[in-house]
């Protein structure tokens, strides 16, 4: 049973047909070719499929695509629409917070959700916020360093 | 890519329509709320629902509202994150925010719903013990109309409840706590909140005329029996004396004896029994100190 749906992804309206059982993750990667959103465990544990729904992080592997209608979806590709790098992206590069890179979209999007509300967030709050994203390389110290540095930049009102 | 197997899909716009679909469906229909438990079990192949009824188009099921002077009503589709951050709940039922913060990761809490957590009837539910000690009542709609049921008598076994075909939870009512009361929820799980609870304890305590006299106490334990359970015997023991270290220790032994934990891959029975004593003692001391520092009137 194909259903016609409308998704607003990175501020762009997309009309597409989906099956009810298709997850948002499947549709983002396979129909819209936004492969920055990864599948790790596919079961809500690893957080590498993180996207923002109305600014809040959710696991795209646990959401039906048709339930993402009427919401603003942000993937890692939509982080900075002005063509440059978002302060978080720049900070991750500067701090060397990317190792294999598989968790990076989830880390950056989770951090963005926090810093958009509170760029002054401290280490403990950052740790709690990122608790849903696993990094098998163990890059956590550098990731936290990068998020703190991005917060400093964003305080200025990015 | 882990995919879901196809199912018949229903998207009722009203509660009445949902009840009609649920009662009329020849296939076994599962309710879809947050999906953080249902979709995982489907992907793992543990269940293969022939039909899903998505409740999210029904309006009015996701608000937190005061009900006069008597208490607060939380819609079944309210997310765990909304409970965690609700200023209304923090003002009157801080325990709810404490329990919500212990559930899963932030992104899971943005999806998972209160009704889903209750309806799933997991013995390790993070919300159930706190809801039990807060005397939560569930509002249930079904083919024979609406009814209200105390949460304590809702669970019948792991994954099973008293819900009849066609019935669903629409909201949860929490009466306002008495003055001079305090509550605490403590959980043991690997890696903080992310993991499923190995054991969890919620306590609600109201003090009498003195700071050591207990007027009322409710104790609920999770992940240590087939259902989230109320520890009645332990409550009676606490009420039988005034709060001293010795009395608290005695009560901790009682709660360990009253639970019936199992050995599984997460933890052994004896470890769970020991840990529930530790959690219980800490939770009782914490709720006691909160009761002492609470305002005399609400």
Image: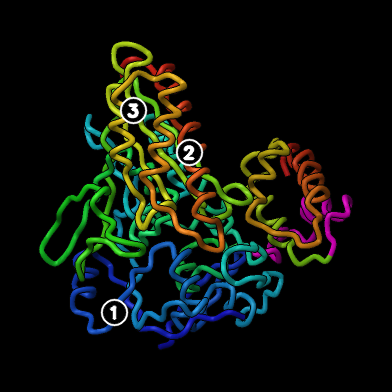
User: Given contact means CB atoms under 8 Å apart, are the residues at marks 2 and 3 in contact?
Assistant: no
Residue B277 is labelled as: 2
- Residue shown at 24% from the left, 46% from the top: B137
Nearer to us in this view, A74 or B7: B7
- The residue pinned by badge 1 equals B28
Judge if badges 1 and 3 mark residues of a common chain. Answer: yes
Measured as percent of width and height from the top left, residue B116 is found at 37, 59
Judge if badges 1 and 2 mark residues of a common chain. Answer: yes
Q: Residues within 10 Å of mark 3 (few under 14, many from 20)?
A: many
Alpha-carbon distance for marks 2 and 3? 14 Å
- Residue shown at 19% from the left, 59% from the top: B141
Magenta residue span: A75-99
Q: Is residue A40 above or below residue B91?
A: below
Nearer to us in this view, B75 or A40: A40
Alpha-carbon distance for marks 1 and 3? 45 Å
SS class, disc 1: loop
SS class, disc 3: helix
Measured as percent of width and height from the top left, residue B159 is found at 35, 64
Measured as percent of width and height from the top left, residue B172 is found at 28, 47
Measured as percent of width and height from the top left, residue B218 is found at 32, 35
Disc 2 chain ID: B
């Amino acid at each position: 049973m194909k259903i016609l749906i409308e998704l607003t992804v990175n501020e762009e309206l997309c009309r597409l047909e989906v099956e009810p059982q298709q997850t948002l993750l499947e549709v983002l990667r396979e129909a819209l070719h936004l492969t920055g959103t990864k599948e790790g465990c596919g079961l809500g544990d690893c957080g590498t499929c993180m996207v923002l729904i109305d600014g809040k992080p959710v696991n795209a592997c646990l959401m039906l695509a048709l339930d993402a209608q009427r919401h603003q979806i942000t993937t890692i590709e939509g982080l900075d629409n002005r063509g440059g790098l978002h302060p978080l992206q720049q900070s991750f590069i500067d701090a060397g917070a990317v190792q294999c890179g598989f968790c990076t979209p989830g880390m950056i999007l989770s951090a963005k959700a926090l810093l958009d509300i509170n760029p002054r967030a401290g280490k403990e709050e950052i740790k709690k916020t990122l608790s849903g994203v696993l990094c098998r390389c163990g890059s956590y110290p550098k990731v936290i360093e990068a998020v703190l540095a991005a917060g400093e930049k964003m305080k200025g009102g990015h | 890519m882990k995919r879901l197997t196809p199912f018949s899909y229903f998207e009722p716009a009203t509660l009445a329509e949902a009840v009609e679909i649920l009662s009329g469906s020849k296939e076994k229909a599962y309710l879809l709320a947050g999906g953080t438990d249902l979709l995982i079990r489907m992907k793992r192949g543990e269940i293969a629902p022939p039909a899903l009824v998505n409740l999210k188009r029904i309006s009015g099921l996701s608000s937190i509202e005061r009900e006069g002077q008597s208490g607060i009503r939380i819609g079944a589709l309210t997310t765990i994150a909304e409970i965690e951050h609700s200023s209304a709940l923090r003002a009157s039922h801080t325990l709810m925010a404490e329990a919500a913060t212990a559930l899963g990761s932030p992104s899971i809490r943005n999806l998972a719903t209160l009704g889903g957590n209750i309806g799933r009837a997991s013995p390790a539910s993070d919300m159930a013990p706190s809801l039990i000690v807060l005397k939560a009542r569930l509002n249930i709609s079904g083919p024979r109309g609406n009814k209200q049921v105390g949460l304590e008598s809702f669970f019948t076994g792991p994954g099973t409840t008293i819900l009849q075909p066609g019935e669903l939870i629409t909201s949860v009512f929490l009466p306002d706590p008495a003055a001079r009361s305090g509550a605490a929820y403590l959980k043991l799980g690997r890696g903080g909140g992310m993991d499923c609870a190995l054991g969890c304890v919620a306590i609600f305590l109201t003090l009498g005329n003195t700071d050591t006299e207990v007027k009322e106490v409710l104790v609920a334990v999770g992940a240590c029996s087939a259902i989230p359970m109320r520890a009645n015997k332990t409550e009676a023991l606490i009420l039988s004396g005034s709060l001293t270290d010795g009395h608290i220790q005695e009560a901790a032994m009682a709660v360990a004896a009253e639970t019936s934990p199992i050995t599984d891959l997460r933890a052994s029975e004896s470890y769970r029994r020991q840990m529930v004593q530790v959690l219980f003692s800490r939770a009782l001391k914490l709720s006691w100190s909160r009761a002492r520092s609470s305002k005399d009137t609400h």
